[in-house]
Image (tube, grey):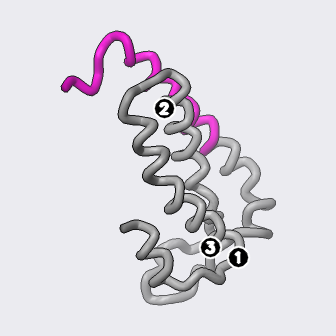
Amino acid sequence: MTLVTESNLLAYLYGFLSVLVTCFIILTSKKWHLKYSSDSNVGPQKIHKDLVPRIGGFSLLAGIVTAILFEIPFAAGFFIGGLPVFLTGITEDISNKIPPLFRLRQVF
């Protein structure tokens, strides 16, 4: 099975563009996201010097939804399979109250 064909190349392009646009929106509205969903920059695994918005999953979701709209066959499977992980992640990003073990279970 060839993943890139002439018929779905436009869908990949639109999916990529939707990710870029969403990332741009997230970066330009950083102050708002930092107020509601920022992550601490203190700790042994933290590499950022400044606070970072934790809402980047939206750009991935936008790309997958765009691909589904253009009917890339396997994109719907990614969307359905990843939806529990995305919803758990976005809930944890906003609330910071979802235990790591629960998040890990959502992946499997």
Residue at 56%, 54% in the rendered image: 57
Instruction: Measuring from the top left, give residue 95's x and y in whole percent.
Output: 70, 76
| Most common secondary structure along the magenta stretch | helix
- Left/right of residue 73 with respect to residue 52 in the rendered view: left
Residue 51 visible at all: no
Q: Is residue 19 above or below residue 40?
A: above
The residue that label 1 is drawn on is 95
Say whether marks 1 and 2 touch (CB < 8 Å). Answer: no
Compared to residue 28, the image places residue 107 above or below, namely: below
Give the amino acid at mark 3. Answer: Glu
Q: Quadrant of residue 89?
A: bottom right
Query: Crowding at label 2, few (<14), some or many (≥20) Cα neighbours within 10 Å?
Result: some
Look at the numbered disc 2 and give the secondary structure of its residue: helix
Closer to the camera, 57 or 38? 57
Sequence-wise, the earlier of marks 3 and 2 is 2
Residue 106 horizontal/vertical position (percent):
46, 69
**Alpha-carbon span between mark 1 and mark 2:** 29 Å
Q: Quadrant of the C terminus?
A: bottom left
Pick out the residue farthest to the top: 6
Q: Which residues are magenta?
A: 1-23
Would you call the spot at circle 1 few (<14 residues within 10 Å), some (14-19), or many (20 or more)? few
Query: Residue at position x 44%, y 88% from top?
Result: 44
| Amino acid type of the residue that numbered disc 2 sits on in the rendered structure | Phe
Q: Which residue is mark 3?
A: 92
Three-letter code, disc 1:
Ser
Residue matched to label 2: 16
Percent across and percent down for residue 5 are 29, 16
Mark found first going from the N terminus, 1 or 2: 2
- Residue drawn at the location 46% of the way across and 21% of the way down: 11
